[in-house]
Image (cartoon, rainbow, N blue to C red):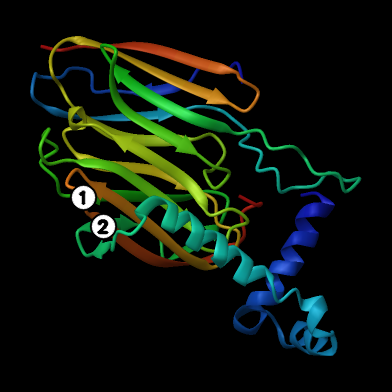
Amino acid sequence: MTGGHVRIGVRRRDVIVGASAGAAILALMRSLPASAQDPAKTPAALKEFDAAFKQIVGEGKPVPGKLKLEIPEIAENGNTVPYLITVESPMTENDHIKAMHMLSTSNPQPGVASFTLTPLMGKASIASRMRLAKTQDVVALAEVSDGQFLVARRTVKVTIGGCGG
Amino acid sequence: MAVKPRIKLPARAKVGEVIEIKTLVSHVMETGQRRDQDGKVIPRMIIHTFTAKYDDKPLLEAKLWPGTSANPYFQFFMKVPGPGSFEFTWVDDAGTVINEKVELNVE
């Protein structure tokens, strides 16, 4: 861990302090001016997430339910959090999943991975591992060959944040 | 970096069967967010693209961002069209290309 980690970590903690940190830190926080608490941090990350989300779906209205996102509810180590995205699809030329995307809502950058799928896969299911800087929602998107978008959203509690990402 | 990627395929596969493929490559996936002890930003160095082909036909492509963990791991599937070979490719920010070809044992 470098100095940079620590500094970034403290700033992020400002945002989640109410939920997770001790009373002593809370008291210290209250004594700080609002500007020192970096109130823009979370809204900025969320704004970037919204932009990334819109870039994928455009004017589309993603439908929840059909896309299954499996990810631990509690991640002890935010550096490597396993996830699995699955959609029941015949994966034929006429009816398949074209793309799947994984996004974070509160990492420094929202992008995790964007997958381009092919009917050759036979099954629309991808597993990988992601970083989570802190407790937050993660969002998976899938694009069906007919242009429809599917979405799933899950909250992951992070005990030890992953470094950036 | 020079470490050989790890690929896991079934020992044998039948035509039409949906098989599981697992790949793992060693890479730091430096996010570009971290600072060194002097406070200087450590430049981003990630694998930004992973592709899987079977007999030169695209199977899966992944664009990656710093939100993907170090040593990128992927698990995905293929419906076996017939005998052939996989080609897996990883490309990082320095332009380093890791390429791995594996034949599938089709009965």
Q: Is residue A5 left or right of residue B45?
A: right
Q: Secondary structure at mark 1?
A: strand
Q: Which label is found at residue A87? A: 1
Q: Is residue B69 positioned above or below B107 on the image?
A: below
Residue A105 visible (yes or no): yes
Q: Amino acid at mark 2?
A: Leu
* Residue depicted at x 76% and y 54%: A5
Q: Earlier in the sequence, mark 1 or mark 2?
A: 1
Q: Is residue A43 positioned above or below A92 on the image?
A: below
Q: Which label is found at residue B76? A: none
* Residue depicted at x 26% and y 57%: A150
Q: Secondary structure at mark 2?
A: strand
**Residue B93, position as x, y percentages in the image:** 62, 28
Q: Is residue A158 positioned above or below A97 on the image?
A: below
Q: Is residue A79 left or right of residue A83?
A: right
Q: Is residue B32 left or right of residue B13?
A: right
* Residue depicted at x 56% and y 65%: A47
Q: Could you say which is closer to the camera, residue B3 or residue B36?
A: B36
Q: Please give the residue where the numbered disc 2 appears in the rendered image.
A: A150
Q: Is residue B52 left or right of residue B13?
A: right
Q: Is residue B14 positioned above or below B93 on the image?
A: above
* Disc 1 and disc 2 in contact, CB within 8 angstroms: yes
Q: Chain of mark 2?
A: A
